[in-house]
Amino acid sequence: MRLLLPLLLIPISIAACQSDTVDRMQLEGEPVSFAELKGYTSTTERNATVFTSTRSNKDASSIVIRTVRMDERSDRTPEEIVRATQASLEAMPKASVSTPTSVDDAYLEAMQFDVSFEPRTKPGKTYERRHVVLFGDDYAFHVLHTAPKGRMGDLAKDFRRVVETLREES
């Protein structure tokens, strides 16, 4: 019986360890991983990966991840990336951009902007965007959630999960 008791405890230990892990996905050719997005299709557009939900209106909402290498150049420090991101967001048509705020529940250091704007391709329609910039050792990661005004809730939980679990991979 003494030998049997330790063997009975092994499966319980393994199950407990497995329950704390999440299935992760890594973007092909990119140094980034995050909790797996289930129920999404992905495409690559302008050096970014765009995730569209298969569960909701495909035109309504998307999550985008873009990777930028940081280096010793002064224009690629986290502070400068935040300034450049804010300037870029403010240049969007009819943009209203929040002051950047720290994201406390992200694994990496992160800053967040909230934006409302009118896309050039959809005059008269207001869209909202949450834009989070996360900083690893060698890369900055832009994670965007964009939706028509009032539709941000559609994918908000999945967006938060990406932001909270995003890691830089070597």
Image (cartoon, rainbow, N blue to C red):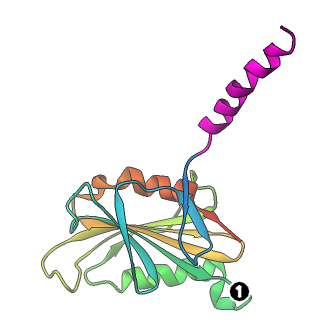
Q: Is residue 16 magenta?
A: yes
- Left/right placement of residue 124 relative to residue 132 reads left
Element under label 1?
loop
Depth check, front residue: 138 or 117? 138
**Residue visible at 74% across and 19% down in the picture:** 8
Report if residue 53 is visible in the image.
yes
Of all residues, the one furthest to the top in this rendering is: 1
Please state the horizontal and vertical placement of residue 39, each as a whole percent of the image: 34, 55
Q: Residues within 10 Å of mark 1 (few under 14, many from 20)?
A: few
* Residue 74 sits above or below residue 161 on the image: below
Above or below, 46 against 21 in this view is below
Provide the residue designation for mark 1: 71
How far from the left and from the top, in percent, is residue 80?
Answer: 60, 83
**Most common SS among magenta residues:** helix
Q: Nearer the viewer, residue 33 or 81?
A: 33
Q: Quadrant of residue 19?
A: top right
Horizontal relation, residue 131 to residue 59: left or right: right
**The furthest residue to the right:** 2
| Quadrant, the N terminus | top right
Q: Residue at position x 45%, y 79% from top?
A: 48
Q: Is residue 28 magenta?
A: no
Query: Can you see residue 103?
Result: no
Label 1 is placed on what type of residue?
Asp
Where residue 125 sits, quadrant-wise, is bottom left
Q: Which residues are magenta?
A: 1-21
Query: Is 51 placed left or right of 116 in the picture?
Result: right
Q: Please report the residue visible at 62 percent of the width from the left and 73 percent of the height from the top.
A: 31
- Quadrant location of the C terminus? bottom right
Spot occupied by residue 161 in the image (x, y as percentages of width and height): 48, 52
72 to 137, vertically: above or below: below
